[in-house]
Amino acid sequence: MMAGKIGIGMLAAMMTGLTTAADWPQWRGPDRDGISKEKGILADWSTPPKRLWLVTIAGMGYNGPAVAGGVIYLTGSKGEPKARIGVLEARNASDGSLKWEYEYGKEWSGGYDAARTTPTVANGHVYLVSGMDRVVCVNAADGNKIWDVNLFERFHGKNITWGIAESPLLVDNKMLICHPGGPDAAVAALDVNTGATIWATKGLSDASAYCSPSLLTLNGKRQIVTQTAENVVGIDPDTGAVLWKHPHKNKWAVHPNTPVVVGPDRVVVSSGYGYGTECLQIGADGATLAWQLKDADNHFHGMLLIDKRLYLAGSKGPLFCLDPQTGKVLSRIEGVSRTAIIGTEAGLIGYDEVGKMIALIRIEGDKGRLAGSLPVDFGSKMKEHWGQPVLAGGVLYLRHGDALVAYDLKSKP
């Protein structure tokens, strides 16, 4: 059974106030690292967990939900091709019933025209970034709009090949971090209460690259770490000053993986299309490459640091278990393909990209084995299975296309 500790460099002051240990209030969970700290999770799925409910939601999406205070928040894209509209829904976690919905405007209508963003929920507000780079803040209780900002208009940025696909980062309950991709504004911070600009990255003008950033501590300094179309960058959260940058660009400038801290001065990033995984050492003089592994070319399925081991999927199928300090492959976990993963005390929960199954993967030393699975028999309207699993209050939530399903992971089947 995996321990609850997740290594060095916990995020600071992320989601205080309205969320609890049983919530999953943003992309990749409470600490934005893909790790659940819940106890009592089922450790054997040989008899599949009980399905609690299945609902059809308003729009199509690749994203998973956020869950806070007994409410599920998720976005979807609906309407005619080339005229897609984004909708944010709030649903009761108990039965999936609709509380309210809010149409937040024009959504991405190009290739893969489904919603991308996972909302961020904090202090009675819900924040999202649309595929058209519009940031929206609504009241979590009733869905009424509080403010919105068109980042392309404000910062003169341009959209990217497959539309903006980030989930916003909240810092210190006062600023929201996003990627306008404009001149002197690759990254910007907005006031959480008004949407006003707090800072933009003067001197950094890279386009957005689908990445959802992290707030990390590296080399003793707190910093926002993210990936742009051209670089991995560290940014001072107070001023927006660029602390360091390291060249990182694959074939399509697609970098939708959130960076993971693996030591006091080390961070790991990963990209698909054969580019692979890199570990960067951050010092007074900037970033240097500690190691690189091209085989572990994680496209957008996420990475986990658990008990000094790094887990991630490669584009050719297996899950890798790596030594995060050296990049050495300790094992390859077969039986799942290009899998989006989260970590729990019971093991890894993986959602297979090809739609074959949702699997529980028990960790035994540096190896893993399948300990049961669930069929993917919902949301048949969409070919791609790109949603991230979400665990909140002992319930596993999975999104595929226009379907949302909930499984009980605490009661024995």
Image (tube, rainbow, N blue to C red):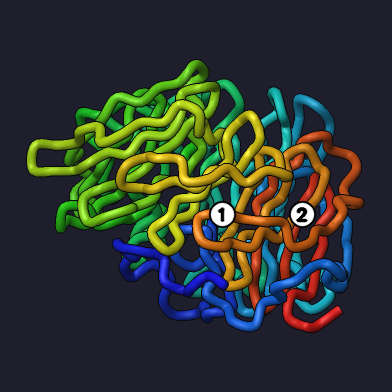
Location of the C terminus (image quadrant): bottom right
**Place of residue 140 in the rendered image (x, y in percent of width and height, measured from the top left):** 60, 70
Give the vertical position of 171 relative to 41 (above or below).
above
165 or 89, which lies in front?
Answer: 165
Crowdedness of circle 1 by 10 Å Cα count: few (<14), some, many (20+)?
Answer: some
Lateral position of residue 269 relative to residue 44, left or right: left
Q: Mark 1, mark 2: which one is toward the viewer?
A: 1
> What residue does disc 1 label?
367
- Mark 2: which amino acid? Ile
Lateral position of residue 328 relative to residue 133, left or right: left
Give the vertical position of 365 relative to 182 (above or below).
below
149 or 107, which lies in front?
Answer: 107
- Mark 1: which amino acid? Lys
> Can residue 285 be seen in this snapshot?
yes
Location of the N terminus (image quadrant): bottom right
Q: Which mark is residue 358?
A: 2
